[in-house]
């Protein structure tokens, strides 16, 4: 489901990967490449060239180091602090590099900072048995399990070592970046403590992955907390954000193009998940494994590259329905089967 056509995209130009585009005084849009089907991330520079705050950083890849070095030299940027919206590698990956190379301050939410340090400590070949058991109970087959085991530790490999200390930022904080004051808005469900920056003049919302114009952000369950209910957190965050931001604000998302229509988009995201929950509930008139629910949740092909994400997302929907009291699960032959109550 996409409501793309109902949103307004007022900025015509898009910076190429490794380049920047000034969109207002003291506000610059930077793009960096990602090595996936989602092939870019948007980063934001707040302030004038001699004193800039960088919001999110890009993935730690040789190509990104090269592009950042060239861009900083070309534009003569002086980046004084780095603000991270959340702990995913495309956002935080170069954070430690900026601290080491440019002696920046480093700002992040506490939960995401700690979670990122924990996840980047996972070492290849050291997969916990509970993680394997978790995926077996979710119905994962041998081949997919082997793939999971072989990729364990990947998260840390695309993040420059995280700085050993950081400045905590939390929802409600007011920060002075550039000529504007920014209020920190917190969301949960995509990661545990995702931060957005809302300018006090209500003109701009740097939304990270909390509101994206065309894709629905990943909301998944992982082996560290099998009973987590991130989808209810996500839906509640969307509702809260809608009450906090102006419909006319220019949303500056981490992926896709800047747009106007925050309320429309938040409503569409909430409705998408509620519709998926309903279809899933209907499907579960017959008992099914998590891996047998993809057809009602995704309108794209699930292959080996996105299987783990799809399974995590399916578990998030199942946990949400279970904790709303709508379905129950039963362990049969070592695999959970879910059925409507
Ligand atoms: Zn993310
Ligand atoms: Zn992202």
Image: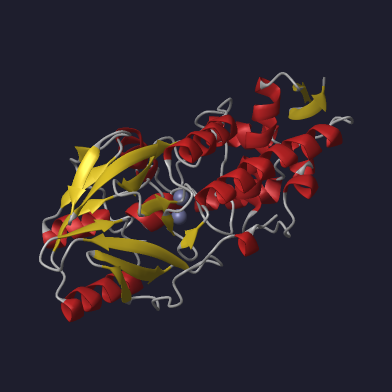
Name the colour scheme. secondary structure
For residue 213, what is the image quadrant? bottom right
Q: Quadrant of the C terminus?
A: top right
Closer-to-camera residue (71/113): 71
Closer-to-camera residue (1/202): 202
Q: Is residue 218 visible?
A: no
- Locate residue 24, reporting x and y percent: 29, 67
- Locate residue 303, reporting x and y percent: 69, 59
- At a point 46% along the width and 51% down the height, the residue shown is 209
Q: Residue furthest bottom?
A: 74
- Locate residue 262, reporting x and y percent: 51, 50
- At a point 43% along the width and 75% down the height, the residue shown is 14
In this picture, is 254 found above or below 133?
below
Q: Quadrant of the N terminus?
A: bottom right
- Locate residue 23, reporting x and y percent: 32, 70
- At a point 26% along the width and 62% down the height, the residue shown is 45
In this picture, is 301 found above or below 313?
below
Q: Would you say 279 lies left or right of 74 here?
A: right
Closer-to-camera residue (12/237): 12
Q: Would you say 122 lies left or right of 152 here?
A: left
The quadrant of the picture showing ligand 2 is bottom left
- At a point 50% along the width and 42% down the height, the residue shown is 190
Q: Is residue 211 visible?
A: yes
For residue 51, what is the image quadrant? bottom left
Q: Would you say 39 lies left or right of 81 here?
A: right
């Amino acid at each position: 489901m996409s409501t793309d056509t109902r949103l307004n995209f007022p900025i015509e130009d898009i910076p190429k990967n490794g380049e920047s585009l000034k969109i207002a005084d003291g506000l610059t849009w930077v793009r960096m490449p990602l090595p996936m089907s989602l092939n870019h991330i948007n980063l934001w520079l707040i302030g004038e060239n001699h004193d800039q705050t960088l919001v999110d950083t890009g993935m730690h890849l040789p190509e990104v180091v090269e592009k950042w070095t060239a861009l900083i030299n070309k534009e003569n940027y002086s980046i004084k602090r780095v603000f991270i919206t959340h702990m995913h590698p495309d956002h935080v990956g170069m954070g430690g590099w900026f601290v080491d190379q440019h002696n920046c301050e480093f700002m992040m939410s506490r939960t995401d900072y700690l979670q990122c340090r924990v996840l980047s400590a996972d070492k290849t070949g050291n997969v916990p048995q509970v993680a394997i058991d978790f995926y077996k109970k979710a119905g994962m087959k041998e081949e997919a399990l082997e793939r999971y085991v072989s990729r364990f530790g990947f998260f840390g490999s695309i993040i420059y070592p995280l700085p050993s200390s950081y400045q905590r930022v939390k929802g409600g904080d007011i920060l002075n970046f550039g000529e504007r004051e920014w209020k920190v808005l917190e969301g949960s469900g995509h990661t545990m403590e995702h931060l957005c920056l809302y300018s006090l003049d209500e003109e701009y919302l740097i939304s990270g992955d909390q509101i994206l114009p065309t894709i629905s952000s990943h909301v998944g369950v992982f082996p560290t907390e099998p009973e987590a209910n991130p989808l209810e957190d996500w839906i509640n965050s969307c509702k809260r954000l809608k009450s906090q931001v102006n419909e006319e604000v220019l949303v500056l998302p981490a992926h896709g193009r800047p747009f106007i229509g925050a309320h429309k988009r938040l409503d569409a995201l909430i409705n998408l998940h509620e519709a998926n929950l309903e279809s899933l509930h209907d499907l579960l008139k017959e008992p099914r494994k998590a891996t047998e629910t993809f057809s009602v949740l995704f309108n794209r092909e699930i292959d080996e590259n996105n299987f783990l994400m799809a399974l995590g997302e399916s578990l998030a929907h199942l946990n949400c329905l279970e904790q709303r009291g709508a379905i129950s699960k039963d362990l049969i032959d070592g695999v959970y089967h879910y059925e409507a109550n």
